[in-house]
Image (spheres, helix red, strand yellow):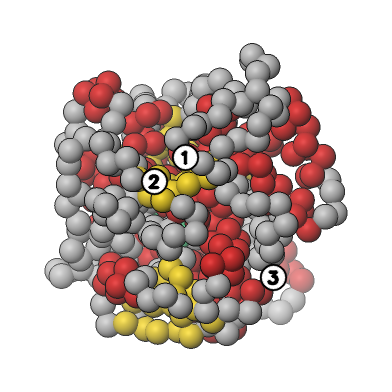
Amino acid sequence: MAEKPAAIIERFPGRAAQVCIMPGCGGIFGLNERVYVCPKCSGPLEIECKPPEGVLVSALRARWDARAVSQEPQDRSGVWRYRELLPFDEGVRCVTLFEGNTPLYEAPRCAQYARIDSLRLKHQGCSPTGSFKDTGMTVAVTQALALGARTVVCASTGNTAASLAAYAARAGLQAAILLPRGQITASKLAQSMDYGAAVFELDGNFDDCMRLIQELGSEPSIYVANSINPFRIEGQKTVAFELMMQLGWRVPDQIVVPGGNMGNSSALGKGFDEMLALGLIDRTPKLNIIQAEGTAPLATLFAALDVKDATAAAQLPEMALLAVEHPRTLATAIKIGAPVSWRKSLRAVLRTGGQIISISEQEIADAKAMIGRDGIGCEPASATTVAGIRRLAASGHIRRGESVVAVLTGHVLKDPDYVSQYHHGTLSLETDGAPIKIAGTFANVPQRVAANKTALLQQLEARR
Ligand code: F0G
């Protein structure tokens, strides 16, 4: 790789700015302007950061390696370790729970199940609040403090809420979270309660909560921490940096992530783009997004797209996303019919030659059980990845010998009811008509046994 100083972007004064991504808009806003979408065209904003002047790629990597074993609070965080590429000045008061630093596992059973040679799982569920949201929340809450906000708010299917509640508590800010009543898991709700957030349960779905949040965003004392906020994406993009360090800077062929509100996929796309621009990597992996069949607006749009044309044009196609009005899935984390960051994630998929597909509830449930059998475990939404890889391998998009990384987004204990019902064969999805029954294909049910050694050994023998 050529050893040259990172190129400096000269589109704005200062180190970073918020930039509208819509082709032809050109809106640029300061970091301290509290805008979440472009005030000119309502398009999505992203942060452009000038890389440190004159720093060589090898020096940057060496710096990050050194910080990974340092005990300084900013270095211990797997987000702030990469602060050269974050839009903050030295000396900012970081709100951190030492997020990031998540494991990358080999998953041989999952690879076999997906019919590929090997598969690695980056488990973002192994984080302070048990989901990938923490890498974004440390940055968003740090910015909320810097702006002097009093209250941080979010709409959530549960994980964003738990994460925001925790980081707001660390920062001494009020947190207000809006949840669709009866549609989030007990574990996630319990977390938000324990971290002391003001919890509001709305009669409606996630998309209704999100609409209300966008209205609240105009209040000066309130700061919106959903992934529509480009500072969230800045934190989440560092997962791509950490992954590349773990892979010894060997770029994988394929990355696979679940898709809900599309913040995660947008962030990974941005992380890889930035590393490419800096010369830290010489190509990007194909970014693939998997949605649940009952709530797959972006997969539907993608299927209707002339991908070759859109990729050649290297810009966002002039299309509108058709929202799913009544989203349905047991993977409640991704039960979202109108994802706010779809343009950013579609752009990343088109740039890298990835795909966006949807899969059934049965496929999610069986893939989740497989991830468990590898000794890893995850919540249902995360399992869309392994199920998606199986589909993409069958269709030939993923080739057997390619290096593939799936990003698991939530911990197995985020939804214990789902796990228990799958293994007992009682899992089912309510619909307008007959409920869809999910088979416990890889069920593992607790067995009753008499309280003596012989009986126990007999049953163990029978299971061998
Ligand atoms: N996986 C899990 C476990 C999630 O909690 C989410 C989103 C996703 C995947 C999808 O990620 O939205 O960035 O595309 N959960 C949000 C929440 C919406 O409120 O916790 P995305």
Distance from mark 3 CB to nearest ligand 1 atom below 8 Å: no
Which residue shows up at 25% across the image and 24% down it?
313
* Number of the front mark, 3 or 2: 2
Q: Earlier in the sequence, mark 2 or mark 1?
A: 1
Q: Position of residue 277 (x, y in %)?
A: 53, 27
**Amino acid type of disc 2?**
Ile
Residue 165, above or below 304: below
Judged from this view, the residue extending furthest toward the left is 433
In the picture of the structure, the residue carrying the numbered disc 3 is 455
Marks 3 and 2 sit apart, C-alpha to C-alpha, by 72 Å
Q: Quadrant of residue 139?
A: bottom right
Distance from mark 2 CB to nearest ligand 1 atom below 8 Å: no
- In the image, 458: left or right of 147? right
The foreground one among 28 and 166 is 28
Tell me, yes or no, whether the two marked residues, 2 and 1, touch with CB atoms within 8 Å.
Answer: yes
Q: Earlier in the sequence, mark 1 or mark 3?
A: 1
**Amino acid type of disc 1?**
Phe
Number of numbered markers: 3
**Amino acid type of disc 3?**
Ala
* Mark seen at residue 28: 2
Which residue shows up at 64% across the image and 14% down it?
2
Disc 2 is placed on an element classified as strand
Q: Quadrant of ligand 1?
A: bottom left
In the picture of the structure, the residue carrying the numbered disc 1 is 12
Q: Position of residue 296 (x, y in %)?
A: 26, 51
Residue 175, above or below 359: below
